[in-house]
Amino acid sequence: MAWILVTPALLILAYLFQAWSKKKFERRLPPGPKSIPVLGHLHLIGKNPHQDMQKLAEEHGPVMYLRFGFVRNIIVSSPQAAKQFLKNYDLNFVNRPPHEAAKYISYDQRNLSFGSYGPYWRNMRKLCTLELLSSTKINSFKSMRKEEIRFLVDRIENAAREHDTVDLSDLVGSLSADVSCRMIFGKKYEDNEIDERGFKVVIQEGMQLAALPNLGNFFPYLSLLDLQGLTKRMKAVAKVYDKFLQKILDEHDVLKEPGQTKDFVDTMLDIMKSGVAEFEFDRTHIKAVLLLN
C-alpha cells in the first residue's frame, strides 16, 4: 500500500519541476490547446488518437504542441511541414525518446528502430546495410526463395486437385514468414517452438504491449511502480524472446554445414568473433538486431 502514498508525492515533485522548467521552453514551442496540470493534453486524446489530433490540428495548425504527462510532443499534420522535419532538418529530430516497451523487449533500445541517434546507431545501420541487406547478400538467398515459392504453388495445386478451400492471405503470410526465417535463422521453426502459446501469439502480445498507453512513457517517475502491470508482462515476453534467440545462437555455434549459404545469424556471429565491428558488438546486440527483423 506504500505506493498509494508514494505516487501522489512523485507527481507533486514532478509537477513542481515541470513548472520550474516550463518558462525555459514555452517561448520556443508551436501553438497548441490549453493544457491542465500534470496530465497536460492527455485528456484531449480518446480511443482514436489520430482523429483527435486531426481535429486539434484544424484549430491550431499543421505544427502543433501537445504535452502528454511530462513528455513534450510536436505534432506535424501536413506534407509541407513533414518534409521540413523528415528531410530538411532530419538530424535535429532523428533521435528516439525513452520507451518502456523497447527498454524491456528490445534490449534497452539497442536496435535500429528504437536506438538513440549517435555513433552506435550509425555503426549499427552501417553493419546492417553492408553485411545483411546488401544486394549481394539478398541475392545469395535466391534459390531458397524459389524453393519456398515452389512449395506454395504445390500446396495450391494439391488443394485444387482435392477441391479444398484455400486461404491465399494465410498462405502468402506463411510464405513471407518462412522466407524470412530461412534468411535470418537458416531454417523454419514450428509455431510452438518459441513458446507453448505459439509464435504468433507471443509476437502479437509483444506488439500489443508496445502500442498500449503506458504511464511510464508519460510519467517516467512512475515507471518503477508498474501501476498498470505492463512492466511485468513486458518482462515475461522479453524472457520468452531471449530464450528463443539464445537457442538460435547456440545452435549456430554448434551446427555448421560447410558450403551452406550463411544466414543473418552466421554473418553476425562471424563479425562478433572476428572483432572487425567498429563498436561494441556482442550476443545482446545480435539478438536486438534479430528481434527487429
Image (cartoon, rainbow, N blue to C red):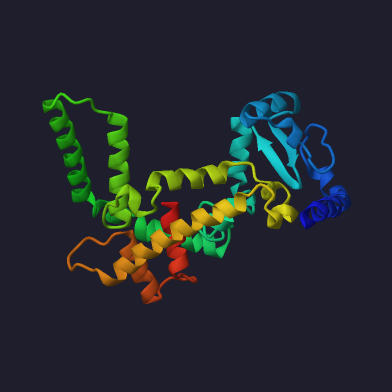
Q: Is residue 80 above or below residue 211?
A: above
Image coordinates for residue 85, horizontal then vertical, percent:
62, 42
User: Residue at (28%, 47%) from the top-left corner?
Assistant: 179
- Residue at 48 percent of width and 63 percent of height: 123
What is the x, y in percent for residue 208?
A: 53, 42
Tell which of 3 and 241 is nearer to you: 3
Q: How many marks?
A: 0
| Left or right of 292 in this view: 174 | left
158 above or below 86? Answer: above
Relative to residue 293, is residue 102 drawn left or right?
right
Q: Is residue 214 left or right of residue 255?
A: right
Residue 202 in sight here: yes
The N terminus lies in quadrant: bottom right
Residue 120 picture location, percent across and down: 53, 64
Does residue 115 appear in the picture of this structure?
no
| The image quarter in which residue 276 lies | bottom left
**Which residue sits furthest front?**
1
Q: Nearer the viewer, residue 280 or 52?
A: 52
Residue at 81%, 56% (x, y): give it. 6
Q: Position of residue 69 (x, y in %)?
A: 75, 44
Which is more toward the observer, 281 or 291? Answer: 291
State the image quarter where residue 134 is shown.
Answer: bottom left
188 in relation to 34, above or below: below
- Farthest-out residue, left: 161
Depth order, front residue of 90/192: 192
